[in-house]
Amino acid sequence: MFFPRSYIDRRTVLRISQLQGSGEKVTVIGTLTSIQENGFGRKKRLEAILQDETGMVKGVWFKGVSYFKKSLKKGEQVAFFGSVKRYGRFLSMAHPEVEQISSIDERNPSGQESGNRHSTGITHTTGSNPGNSRNRIAGEQQKADNQIFTGIVPIYPGSQFFKKTYITSGLLRKWILSVLDQHPFPEFLPDAILKEFGYPDRKTALRWIHAPKSPDQHKKALERFKFEELFLFELSVVTLKKEVFEKAPGPLMLESRPVTSRFFNETLPFELTSGQKSALSDIKRDIRSGRQMNRLLQGDVGSGKTIVAIGAMLMAMDSGYQSVLMAPTEILAEQHVHSLSQWLEPLGVNIRLLTGNQKRALRDDISSDIAGGTAHIIVGTHAVIQEAIHFHKLGMAIIDEQHRFGVSQRGLLREKGDHPHILVMSATPIPRSLAMTLYSDLDISVIRDLPPGRKPIKTRVLREIDRPGAHKFLTDQLREGGQIYVVYPLIEESEAMDLKNATEGYDQLRVDFPDARVGLLHGRMSSAEKESVMWEFQQNNINILVSTTVIEVGVDVPNASVMLVEHAERFGLSQLHQLRGRIGRGNRQSNCLLMTDVKQSKEARSRLGTMEETNDGFKIAEADLNLRGPGDFLGTRQSGLPEFRYADILNDQFLLEVAKKSAIELVTADPDLKSPERNALRRVFLPYLEKKKAFFRMS
């Protein structure tokens, strides 16, 4: 299962004498006869001569000189791939791609040790005659390396070392083909699936991976292995949902809903959007089914997910159950409590806040309120899932900003009650392919529309030379009664420096805008200090709020219509979108100004360009996923993403859909895989399923 990282198609390799030198892209194979560093300073370059029996071509590198000087060895047989040009009598390739074919030292063809690491073969330290053993296996490696293949040649990842042994690509190929000849590699995918998609059996597919006769063979074999792992994953998802999630009893919540009706019919001053109505309808159906709800609520920044969450918690309260709302940070938990209290305390709803930094007496009081059942809604951080916290009758558990938590937190919340309903909310829109894998155990509701009257936020990328114009714009906005966020990045590795930058920026803004009231907010302030600053900003007692990214989520100040982001190139795309979502919540036209360093990476320019082009969170999420890949997109704290060895959930979404359809059909026809033709699949699948159950804390 150690697959090649690339292939050289020797069916189309040219002799050096066949090269025209007109810029055509070609592959040539030969021996490195000379490696020389020339020039100095910025003009330094590395030149390597590649020679075959018909002529020679020069490879030239102006970047990465040190790297290529170390990695290229005189006497190696390699392939150059790149654009070839003729300069007088000479042929040259600038920055060709290089693939190592063998490691034979031309000065030492016998394989005896000579100080060149590529000529040592395999060094054995056991046996009566280590030297003979070393030479014998070195000879085996030399024969493999010298073998001339006329078809498609696999190139395996890196120089492989095992117990101080260097193994070449040629010898790996020889060993793998030998194992393929001797081992049966039994098939476990059902025959019907192989026939439906035209996939080769497992052993044939492995041969097509390691010794393909055509690119089509390799493509079909690789697709088969991608499908195989996606199919096992989707089969586990379908089985888990059928065995565990769909069978788990959930609190049965009644039709009678006095508090819920009062909230939506009397308290709420605006009409729900169609997306909010649809999500509430999904939740209502789930909680009246008798089964546990496991639902993801997706919506862009400002789409009104909180109102849907309030509806879910009030439905639980009307049926005699408690609800918990878990947020990733204290400031967001505090913001939720502030918002919920304004909406719900007039209706007689008791809301308690539980965080890790509260004093002992207050925590004891809150814990008693929770255990006794007098607390209807509990809002908190990770503190709500600590062992010491006992709920009286937990029926609804809501996780806000799910992308900041792992799967295990969902499992811990389930254990806090008798199968409470689970609602997961994400303000980071997640592309479908990622949602299908990351939240495979959840049903999904999406709010795509925004509340009526929202004006699109205008976003502009600025440089330091644009700062005077930006300050004039800020002055005009302040004169018109607007409020402004000025946001500084906060990177963990340089937290002290970032706080210093924010503090210095705060001092400078007080000088630049002497008539404005400027406030400062950062993560090292106490909860009381942060709450006080945010309250002053919300009441328009602060005109300009200088902040680190603690305001990224949750804080709602409708009069704030301008955001200036300093060092915008240091932020991720989804993070910029989250920050931008703090404005655009009132009637004023909102503007986001992204101040950047002159020196930007290609990726940073792409991120900032995307921010200028669109306000659509789902489009931004797709762009971010393409730029960073799934792992970085979700962040290091997210442990819910399955690891696929061959499949790429970004580019193989069609295969994911096909695998899901096949898994559903199979489980519908044979839920326990008991038919004789599925014995092999059952032997492979059951251990896989047990790992998934443990992953979801369901074993």
Image: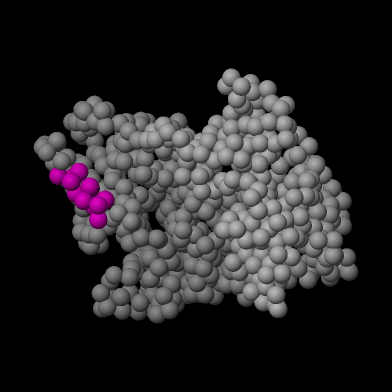
Number of marks: 0
Residue sitting at 37 percent across and 40 percent down?
569
Left or right of 678 in this view: 455: left
Magenta span: chief secondary structure = helix
Q: Quadrant of the N terminus?
A: bottom right
Find residue 378 and report its horizontal and vertical position in percent.
39, 67
Furthest residue in direction right, as rendered: 676
Residue for point 41% across, 75% down: 386
- Is 501 inside the magenta-drawn segment? yes
Horizontal relation, residue 111 to residue 321: left or right: right
Of residues 350 and 535, the one nearer the viewer is 535
For the point 42% across and 33% down, the residue is 39
Q: Is residue 181 visible?
A: yes
Can residue 272 be seen?
Answer: no
- Residue 56 or 283: which is nearer the viewer? 56
Q: x%, y% of residue 210?
A: 76, 52
Q: Is residue 108 left or right of residue 494?
A: right
For residue 75, above or below residue 168 = above
> Viewer-proximal residue, 454 or 25?
25
Q: Is residue 199 left or right of residue 540?
A: right
**Where residue 74 sits in the image (x, y, percent)?**
59, 45
Q: Is residue 451 above or below residue 196?
A: above
Quadrant location of the C terminus in the rendered image: bottom right
| Residue drawn where x is 54% and y is 51% of the image | 630
Tell me if residue 321 is in the magenta stretch.
Answer: no
Residue 184: name its quadrant: bottom right
- Residue 612, position as x, y percentages in the image: 41, 32
Residues shaded magenta = 496-507
Q: Which quarter of the figure has residue 241?
A: bottom right
